[in-house]
Image: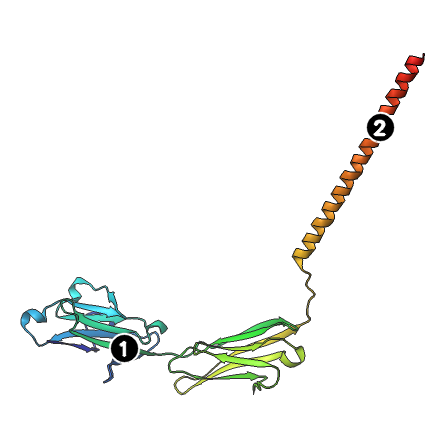
Amino acid sequence: MKLMLKAPLLHFLLFCAAQTSVNADGFVRSELDKTVSLTCLTQGGSGTQAKEELVWLRNGAQVQLMDGNKHGSSSLCVTPVTREDNTATFTCQLKSDASVNASVTLDITYAPMLSGVEEVTVEEQAVLVLQCDIQSNPHVSVLWLKEENQLDLSVGSFVVTSNGFTTELRVNKVDRRLHQGKYECKTVSHVYGTRSKVFNVTVEDKTLKFPLMPMVAGLVVVACTALLAVASRWKRIAKVTYMQIYIHILTQDYHWKAF
């Protein structure tokens, strides 16, 4: 007995019904936010085997099914498909014999999330970092522009890095003359065309920043020194006053005896 996976035009989960095709390589291609419907059927074997319970796995983790959707045939609906569903593998297998199985992998196409304008303010000599989300399927080509001209990385100490998910433009020491202006992150795809995001970068004068902790420590030292000085002076004043009172008492006593 073997299992067969197909993508039906219509099945009993009407709210999930959608036209989906499985190619010869075992991939189901769809677009972001669409619906993918899969049906697993048992073929061949005895009548008992044809009614055996089926199990669905997504990347090896079991998918919970309703009781009426497990025996003989089983349907699975993914709606809406997301970025995380791209390259996910769905496997249908017999519960009693995992070696009897069939699998498909989702191939979800989607464009990078690039749009809008972002205002960026940075100080002179600070670090400037601009980032764009370029995650897409299929992959895209990436361009950075300044004032609508392709950025010359050899001028202005620009550093551009990309990892397939984000692209980053970095300047480690900003100079207003070189770095203030309009930047654009642009992607080009044969499927989705051109997408872009704009950054308006304003460079401000560097502000003088005083180290807070050393200042606090200095104030504490000054305050403690002042308190110690006051305490020491108070002790001297108290000692002198006590001596004056003692001398005065002795003098009074002397006069009394003399009288």
Please indicate whether residue 218 sits to the left or right of residue 183 in the image: right
**Residue sitting at x 55%, y 84%:** 145
Residue 137 picture quarter: bottom left
Residue 116, x across and y down, in percent? 51, 75
**Residue 108 visible in this rendered orientation of the protein:** yes
Q: Quadrant of the C terminus?
A: top right
Residue 213, x across and y down, in percent? 65, 56
Please indicate whether residue 239 sits to the left or right of residue 51 in the image: right
Q: Quadrant of the N terminus?
A: bottom left
**Residue sitting at x 20%, y 72%:** 92
Q: Are marks 1 and 2 in contact (CB under 8 Å)?
A: no
Residue 88, x across and y down, in percent? 30, 74
Please indicate whether residue 83 sits to the left or right of residue 129 in the image: left
**Residue sitting at x 42%, y 77%:** 135
Label 1 Cα crowd, 10 Å radius (few <14 / some 14-19 / many 20+): many
Q: CA distance from mark 1 to mark 2?
A: 100 Å
Residue at the extreme right of the image, as rendered: 259
> If you read the primary sequence from the N terminus, does the residue marked by circle 1 or circle 2 appear first?
1
Pointer 1: what residue?
Answer: 105
Viewer-nearest residue: 142 or 210: 210
Residue 151 picture quarter: bottom right
Q: Amino acid at mark 1?
A: Thr
Q: Amino acid at mark 2?
A: Met
Pointer 2: what residue?
Answer: 243
Residue 25 picture quarter: bottom left
Q: Which mark is residue 78?
A: none
148 w.r.t. 2: above or below: below
**Residue 15 visible in this rendered orientation of the protein:** no
Viewer-nearest residue: 205 or 34: 205
